[in-house]
Image: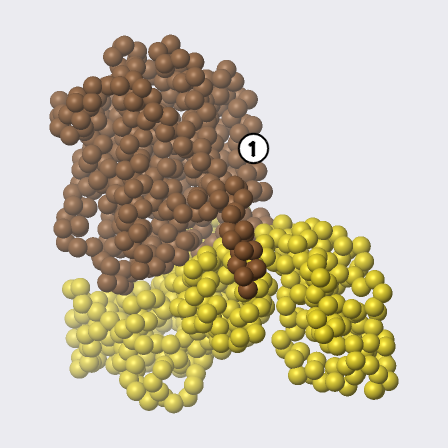
Chain colours: A yellow, B brown
Amino acid sequence: MGIFKGFNEIQIHFSDALGTKIFNEDGIRIGNLSDFFVDYEEVYPLVLAIQFKNSGQYFYISWDDINEYSHKKIIVKNNAFKGRSRTYPKVTTNKIITSILASQFTGNTVEYPPLGKIVLDRQIVDTAGKKVVRVNDIQLIKAGTNLRVTHAAIGLRSMMRRLGYQSAIDSIIKLVKPNSKYLTSEALINWKFVHAIPNKSIQSSVKLNLSNEDIKELHPADLADILEDLDSHGRGIIFKNLDPKTAAETLSEVDDDLQVTMLRNEDLERAADIIEEMDTDDAADLLHELGEQRAEDIISRIDDDEIQEEIQELLEYKDDTAGGLMSTEYLSVLADDKKDDILKKIYKEHEDLETIYSIYIVDKNEKLIGQCSLRKLITQKDNIEIGEVMNSKDVKSMQVDSGWKEVASFMSKYNLMYAPIINESKELLGIISVDDLLPWLLNER
Amino acid sequence: MKDKKVKKEKKKIPSFYKRMIILLGIIGPGIITANIDNDAGGIATYSLVGAKTGYGLLWTLMPITVALIMVQEMSARMGIASGKGLADLIREKFGLKVTFYSLFLLVFADLGNTMAEFAGIASAGEIFGISRYISVPICSLFVWLLITKGNYKTVERIFIAGCTVYLSYIVSGFIIGPDWGEVIHATLVPNLEILTAENMPLVVGLVGTSITPWMQFYIQSAVVEKGITTKHLWHSKVDVIVGCFFMFLVTIFIIICCAVTLHTSGVHITTAADAAMALEPLAGKYSSILFGIGLFNASIFAAALLPLATSYYVCEGMGWESGVDKTFKEAPNFFTIFTSLIIIGAAMVLLPGINLFNILIWSQVINGVLIPIILLFIINLCNDPDVMGEYTNSTTYNVISYGIVLLMLLVNGALIYYEGIQRFL
C-alpha cells in the first residue's frame, strides 16, 4: 500500500487531482499532473499512465513508475520513461470490448487519448438515463495499488467543486439546512453507462471506433431524443454507426427539420438505404421536404423497385391529404383467395406490412370490393374463400384527395384504426392508420 | 405516365404561404444575424450618430463592417468545421471556470440588451402616445407567451420580415437626395477630428451595436442547426458578406437620413423617441409612424429572441437541460434564465426617473467591453486544429483579427477614460 501512503480518501475527484505537483525521487519537480490515460477497454477503466505538461510539451509516465501518489505530490522513479506525446500507446488485447471505446485493430498498438480530453466538460450519452449530459467531473477509486474510473459527475455539486466554491457553498448549506440532500448525494453516472463521443481530431488521428452496442439497445424514440440533444458532430458520429434499419426507425422519430438536415448529411447511397427501410409514407414526407433534385437522386438509388415505385407515387400527393399520409404497405387479396393462402401470405410478408389486422379484398382491376379483419378470418374453417366472409357492403373508405381533418373525423366516427384510401375509380391506393394522423392532431407538424 | 407528368406540373405551384416559407428558408444565417443586429439599440444609435455628427462618423462604418464580416465569418466557419456551438467549444477547450465567468458576463450584457429592447418598446409606444407603464408590461407578457407557447422559427421569420421596414430608409434616402459626392467622401476618408470626448460614446455605441457578443453565439448555432457542411463553406462566406453589406447599407442610410433632416436643421435629440418626433415636421407624419412600427417590431422580437437565445447558450455551456418544449421541472435553469431576463429587463425600464437613452447607450458599452474577450476566444478556437481541422485561420487573418481586438480595446479604453474617470475626478 506504499503508493497511497498518507492518502486516505477512497474516492478521488479528477478535478482535485489536476495540477498535483510531480517530483522525481531526488525531489526535483518535473511538472504538474494534467490528465490520466486509462484502459478504455475495461468497464471501470484502470489508470495506465499520467500526463503532465512541461514547457508547452505533453509527456506521459506509466503508472508503474509512480512511487507515491496523493493530492499533495506525486513521486516518480528517477529512471521513469517520459514519453513525449499527447497520446498513450496502448497495446490492445483481443477481448472485445465494453461500452466506451473499442479498437478497430485488436492486438496492435493504439494511441489512446487522455481521459479528460474525451470526457471532462464534454457531452456524453447516459445510456441508463437515456439523456445527453455534460460531464463536470470524473470520480476515481483507489483499488489496491491502482486507480480505477468509476463515475462521471454531472450535478450542481460537482460544478461548484470545479468552480472552487464547494467548501463555501457546503458551509452555507450546513448552516441553513444541515440535512439537505445536496450535501450527501451527488448526481453521478455509473461508468458502464457512459457513452463518450470522441471529437474530430481524436477520431481521425487515432482511429478509435465507438462500440455502438449500448446505443443500439435503446428504443428508437429515446435515441431520437438523444440525437436531438447532441451537437451536430456527435449526432453525426452516432447516426453514421447505426445500421440502416435502426437509422430508419430513429430518423422517423426525429423532429421534422432535423430529419431533413440529417438525411442531407448522409451520402446518397446510405440515404437511399435508410429511406428504403422507412415506412413509405414517412419516407415520402421526408423526401418531399428534401427538395426535388436531391429526392430524385436518392429515389433512383433505391434497390427495391417496388418501394421505389411506391415512394414515387406517394410523392405525387400533397402531404396534408390522405394521399400524402397513406402508406402503401397494406395487405390486399383477391375474393377467391383461400384462408390458408392468405395466412401464408401474412407469414411471408408481415414485416413489410403496416398492419395485418385489416385485410382488403380487391378485384382484378385493384378495385376495392371488401374488407375483412384477421380475427374474422382465422375463426373460419380452413378452406374458406375470403369472399364468403368479407364485409362487402358499405366498405368504409376515403378518397385520396381528402384533407387530413376529414380523414380523422371519418375514422373517429366509425371507430377505425385503419382506413383504406381509394381514387375515383375505387382503386385501392393505400391505408391510413390512426398513428399517421396523431402528429397532425397534436399539432406537431 | 403522361398523365402523371401533368399532375406533377400542377403540384409544383405552391401556395403563397409556402412560397414565403421557402424564400425565408433560403435566407442564410449570416443575413438573418445581420438583420437582428438592427435592433432597438442599433436604430437609436444610428439615428443619434446622424443627428449629432452628420456625416462625420460615416467613415467609421467601413472598418466596423470589415471587422463584422471577419468576426462573423470566423464564427460561421467554426460552426461549420466543428458542428458545435460557441458556448460548447469554449466549455470543451477552456473548462468550466472560464465558461462560467464568460457566460455570467454574457448574461449580464444580454440583460442590458434586453433592457434596451424594452426601452425600444417603451419609446415606440410613446411615439403613438401609449404610456410605457402600459406598453412594457403587456409586451413582456406577450413576449413570454410567444416563447413558451409559440414557435421559435416563426418568431424569427416574422422578425426578419418586419425588418424590411428599414428598407424605407434607403428609399427615403434617395428621395431626400443628399450630396452623394459628399457622402462618398465622408465614407471613404477618415476624419480624425470628429473623435472627441463628446463623441466617444457614439463610436463605442456604433461598435457595440454592430459587433455584439451574443450575435457570435447566434450565428454559430444557426449555422450548426442548418447543418451546413464544409462543402458549402464558400456559400456561407458569401452569405455573411451579403448580410453585413446589407446591414452597412441600412446603417449608412439611417445616418444619412438623420444627418440631412436633423443635423442640418440643428435639431438636437436626447432620446430615441425624439428621433422619430423630430422626423415628423420635416418628412411628414408617415415617417414617424413608419419609424415607430419599425422600432416596435425590432424591439419586441429582439426582446423575445435575446433572452431565449441567451438561455440556450448558457444551458449549452453549463450542460443544463434546455428547450421550450420541455417542462419547467425538466429544464428549470433554462426557464428561470429567460423568464428573469424578461422580468428584470422590463422592470428596470419602468423604474421611475430612468433615462431610456442611457439604458440604450450603456447596454452597448457592456457589449463593447465583453466583445474583445469573446473575440479572443473565437480567434483562439479558430487556430485550434482540434476544433477546426484544416480550416484554421491564416496568419494574415490572425494579424488583422488581433488588430481589430486591439482597436476595440483602445476605443473602449478611451470611452471608459472619458465617461468614467474624467467625469468623476
Estimate the x, y position of residue B130 in percent, counting from the top left: 52, 18
Looking at the image, which is closer to me, B362 or B101? B362
Q: Is residue A376 left or right of residue B257?
A: right
Looking at the image, which is closer to me, A90 or B141? B141
Asked if residue A210 is positioned above or below residue B113 in the image, the reply reads below
Asked if residue B115 is positioned above or below residue B91 in the image, the reply reads above
The quadrant holding residue A106 is bottom left
Q: Is residue B38 left or right of residue A154?
A: left
Q: Where is the N terminus of chain A found, in terms of image quarters?
A: bottom left
Residue drawn at x 68%, y 71% as measured from the top left: A330
Residue drawn at x 38%, y 29% as measured from the top left: B166
Asked if residue A54 is positioned above or below residue B326 in the image, the reply reads below
Q: Is residue A413 visible?
A: yes
Q: How many marks?
A: 1
Q: Residue furthest front?
A: B2
Asked if residue A124 is positioned above or below residue B89 in the image, the reply reads below
The quadrant holding residue A238 is bottom left
Q: Is residue B360 visible?
A: no
Sort mark 1 into few (<14), some (14-19) or many (20+) by Cα contacts within 10 Å: few
Q: In which chain is the residue bearing label 1?
A: B
Question: Disc 1 marks which amino acid?
Answer: Leu
Looking at the image, which is closer to me, B375 or B124? B124
Estimate the x, y position of residue A308 in percent, counting from the top left: 53, 70
Estimate the x, y position of residue A384 in percent, counting from the top left: 84, 83
Check disc 1 and report its element: helix, strand or loop: helix
Estimate the x, y position of residue B257 in percent, counting from the top left: 30, 20
Residue drawn at x 70%, y 66% as measured from the top left: A428
Report which residue position mark 1 lands on: B141
Residue drawn at x 49%, y 76% as measured from the top left: A303
Looking at the image, which is closer to me, A298 or B146? A298
Q: Is residue A311 left or right of residue B423?
A: right
